[in-house]
Amino acid sequence: MTNRISQLRRERGLSQAELADAVDVTRQTIISLESGRYNASLLLAHRIAKFFGTTIEDVFLFEEERT
């Protein structure tokens, strides 16, 4: 799963620390999300999407597995 957090954050002129404060996580969590080392919980994904005024699907890009 990839995400657009860094792009959305930069478009709004926010630092990682400012976004972290806004969604009640640490800056390290934002760093890990942006680098793809960590996948957000559903609750955190919802908070991030709500903060940016968009949907979870617009922030987090799910790639379906093919069998």
Image: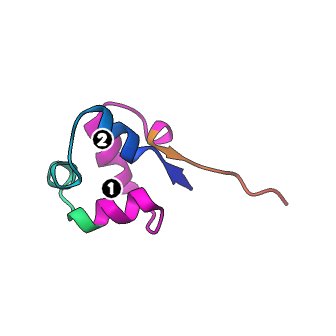
Q: Picture coordinates of residue 36 (x, y %)?
A: 48, 62
Residue at numbered disc 1: 44
| Vertical relation: 47 (above or below) 30 | above
* Residue 30: in magenta span: yes
Quadrant in which the N terminus is drawn: bottom right
**Few, some or many residues within 10 Å of mark 2 (<14, 14–19, 20+):** some
Magenta-colored span? 29-58
Q: Is residue 12 left or right of residue 17?
A: right
Label annotation for residue 58:
none
CA distance for labels 1 and 2: 15 Å
Residue 57 in sight here: yes
Label annotation for residue 9:
2
Q: Amino acid at mark 1?
A: Leu
| Vertical relation: 6 (above or below) 28 | above
Q: Picture coordinates of residue 44 (x, y %)?
A: 32, 55
Which residue is rendered at x = 31% and y = 46% of the image? 48
Name the residue nearer the viewer: 29 or 15.
15
SS assignment for the magenta stretch, majority = helix
Q: Is residue 37 left or right of residue 10?
A: right
